[in-house]
Amino acid sequence: MQLRVALRTGLKSLLEHQVPSADLAAELLLMHLLRQERAFLYTHPDLDLSDQQVDSYFRLISERSSGRPTQYITGHQEFWGLDFEVNPAVLIPRPETEHVVEAVLDLISQQKLSGGACCRIVDVGTGSGCIAVALASELPLASVFATDISPAALEVAARNAARLGMEKRVEFIEGDLLAPFLESESPRAFDFVVSNPPYVARAERESVQREVRDFEPRLAWGDLAQGEEIYGRLFPQALRALKPGGHVAVEIGYKMKDAVLGLLKTGWVETKVIPDLAGIPRVITARKSG
Ligand code: GLN
């Protein structure tokens, strides 16, 4: 079968199964199978695929049609221009989450701290490690720590740090939120606490895509009694773990702005809400007073 026919047939099957971004998925799966870049697909439309390649391609197409995210099939997702390994133990990094990285870099440049001189950062619930590794790659002298309650996620995160040459830059620690840092009497040590925590409420479960609901780890996306409950636990811990003047930067869910701002009334100043490219409030930052 010619490459272009395989691609067209694969796309048709994905569309029949209402797969979102079906044309992108059809291409990515074929690129993955052939170990080629996208340009190859369009410069070799007449290439004859072997029967085995065709069989494998349609197997991948049928996996995707059953709802499994493309990234769990290919094992990769790009974030901040870096290639991250992903598997079902971790949330697939989202482009919106890059705003968390941007927010931290902006705060550092506003404080006129040179990126090189800055600083102690902890990424809470690091999952694939995307935020921690992206920040480490931007801030060559920063000490970056990352926690997760899931040992399986931490294994993926550590592999990502190693693949991207950041294994000496990020220290991964198993634990719930900031608990591993709160054992000492005066743990105030961080300049930044950053997080994209689980924030989907149980009541919103049905509005979440089946790709998330059925395939991504529930521990990572939520299924919580209240979407904002995790911030209610994180912020008091962050107040203890931050230096005076240190910042939190968190991703928030759709329509959660007011509830999360309500949790930053005491102990925090200079609260800021940053929208994503669709104009949805997506990141909140605040400075610990003092
Ligand atoms: N920090 C990771 C990300 O942003 C994982 C987040 C999570 O599992 N909630 O993708």
Image (cartoon, helix red, strand yellow):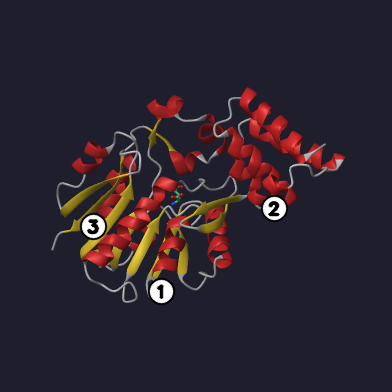
| Image location (x, y in percent) of residue 45 | 74, 42
Identify the secondary structure beneath mark 1: loop
Can you say which quadrant of the picture contains the C terminus? Answer: bottom left
Whether disc 2's CB lies below 8 Å from ligand 1 is answered no
Identify the residue shown where x is 71% and y is 53%: 35
The residue beneath circle 3 is 239
The residue beneath circle 1 is 140
| Image location (x, y in percent) of residue 145 | 41, 65
Question: Identity of the amino acid at label 3?
Answer: Leu
Q: Is residue 8 above or below residue 247?
A: above
Identify the secondary structure beneath mark 3: helix
Q: Which of marks 2 and 1 is in front?
A: 2
The residue beneath circle 2 is 36
Q: In this view, does 264 lie above or below 157?
A: above
Identify the residue shown where x is 32% and y is 50%: 250
- The answer to whether residue 73 is seen in the rendering is yes
Question: Identity of the amino acid at label 2?
Answer: Gln
Q: Earlier in the sequence, mark 2 or mark 1?
A: 2
Q: Which of marks 1 and 3 is in front?
A: 1
Q: Distance between the residues labelled 3 and 2?
A: 48 Å
Q: Which of marks 3 and 2 is nearer the N terminus?
A: 2
Q: To which quarter of the image does residue 228 belong?
A: top left
Q: Distance between the residues labelled 1 and 3?
A: 26 Å
Other residues around mark 2 within 10 Å, as few (<14) / some (14–19) / many (≥20) = few
Other residues around mark 3 within 10 Å, as few (<14) / some (14–19) / many (≥20) = many
Q: How far apart are marks 2 and 1 (CA)?
A: 32 Å
Other residues around mark 1 within 10 Å, as few (<14) / some (14–19) / many (≥20) = some
| Image location (x, y in percent) of residue 51 | 86, 39
- Do the CB atoms of the residues marked 1 and 3 lie less than 8 Å apart? no
| Image location (x, y in percent) of residue 5 | 75, 34
